[in-house]
Image: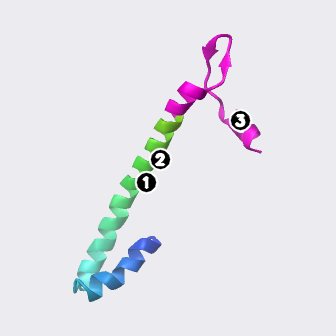
């Protein structure tokens, strides 16, 4: 099932651009394919930024920086 933004665009594609049923189907299929890549890029970028920030502001033990484990992060947020 396509996301809400794809469904909202159907009216614009039909009324303004004059797309038929076949073209709408193609546009929805293309949207679903590219949306997966966008989500993967977003998650990878968020993880990269987290690693960079953790490198500079992570906890220090015994004179060296140590990455924070997920259990440490969960206990701090709860």
Q: Residues within 10 Å of mark 2 (few under 14, many from 20)?
A: few
Please say whether residue 74 is visible from this viewpoint: yes
Front residue of 66/31: it is 66
- Please give the name of the residue rendered at 35% of the width and 81% of the height, measured from the top-left corner: 10
Label 2: element kind: helix
Q: Which residues are magenta?
A: 51-78
- Report x, y in % for residue 41: 40, 48
Counting every numbered tag in the picture gives 3
- Please give the name of the residue rendered at 76% of the width and 38% of the height, measured from the top-left corner: 75
Q: Mark 1 vs mark 3: which is more N-terminal?
A: 1
User: Is residue 56 covered in magenta?
Assistant: yes
| Numbered circle sitting on residue 39 | 1
Query: Does 76 sit left or right of 20 as displayed?
Result: right
- Report x, y in % for residue 15: 28, 89
- Report x, y in % for residue 17: 22, 83
| Numbered circle sitting on residue 43 | 2
- Please give the name of the residue rendered at 57% of the width and 30% of the height, measured from the top-left corner: 54
CA distance separating discs 1 and 3: 25 Å
Please say whether residue 1 is visible from this viewpoint: no
């Amino acid at each position: 099932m396509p996301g809400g933004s794809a469904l909202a665009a159907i009216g614009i594609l039909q009324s303004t651009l004059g797309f038929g049923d076949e073209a709408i189907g193609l546009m929805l299929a293309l949207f679903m394919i590219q949306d997966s890549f966008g989500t993967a890029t977003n998650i990878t970028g968020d993880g990269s930024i987290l690693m960079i920030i953790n490198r500079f502001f992570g906890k220090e033990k015994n004179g060296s920086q140590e990455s924070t484990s997920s259990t440490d992060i969960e206990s701090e947020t709860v």
